[in-house]
Image: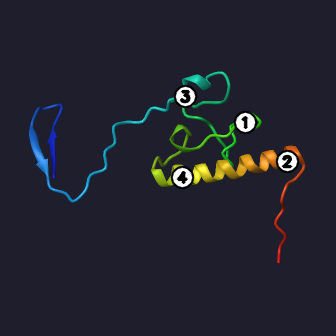
């Protein structure tokens, strides 16, 4: 279970449960990017579906990005997408892009 306290009333209590997910707030640590890439009003990095920031060769992934769902599973997917996009960017720079051929 979990011990809880109502911060408005001071009332204390408990909640019986089998598991707990702690969420303490969300504020992206992106101040160092101000003026370099586009950030939203909360400071989250603006990316496209390929995790590109709008600055050539600069990709972002995870909870620093502007998105609706902030969970480990979505951050992992963002990371995989960003890594693949970065690989394609480097291949294009080197002229060695791999293109899958239909069967």
Dot placed on the residue nearer the N-terminal end, 2 or 1:
1
Q: Is residue 42 left or right of residue 35?
A: left
Q: Nearer the viewer, residue 86 or 21?
A: 86
Picture coordinates of residue 83, whole percent (x, y): 67, 49
The residue located at (68%, 25%) in the rendering is 36
Give the label, 1 or 3, closer to the camera: 3
Q: Secondary structure at mark 4?
A: helix
Q: Inspect this view and state whether residue 60 appears.
A: yes
The residue located at (16%, 53%) in the rendering is 1
The residue located at (60%, 30%) in the rendering is 39
Q: Residues within 10 Å of mark 2 (few under 14, many from 20)?
A: few
Q: Residue 54, which numbered label? A: 1
Q: Residue 92, which numbered label? A: 2
Picture coordinates of residue 13, whole percent (x, y): 10, 44
Q: Secondary structure at mark 1?
A: loop
Residue at image mark 3: 30
Q: CA distance from mark 4 to mark 2?
A: 24 Å
The residue located at (80%, 45%) in the rendering is 90
């Amino acid at each position: 279970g979990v011990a809880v306290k109502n911060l408005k009333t001071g009332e204390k209590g408990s909640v019986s449960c089998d598991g707990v997910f702690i969420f303490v707030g969300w504020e992206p640590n992106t101040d160092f990017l101000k003026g370099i890439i586009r950030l939203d009003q909360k400071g989250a990095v603006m990316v496209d579906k390929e995790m590109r920031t709008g600055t050539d060769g600069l990709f972002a992934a995870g909870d620093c990005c502007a998105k609706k769902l902030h969970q480990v599973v979505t951050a992992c997917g963002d990371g995989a997408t960003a890594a693949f996009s970065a690989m394609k960017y480097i291949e294009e720079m080197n002229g060695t892009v791999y293109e899958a051929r239909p069967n």
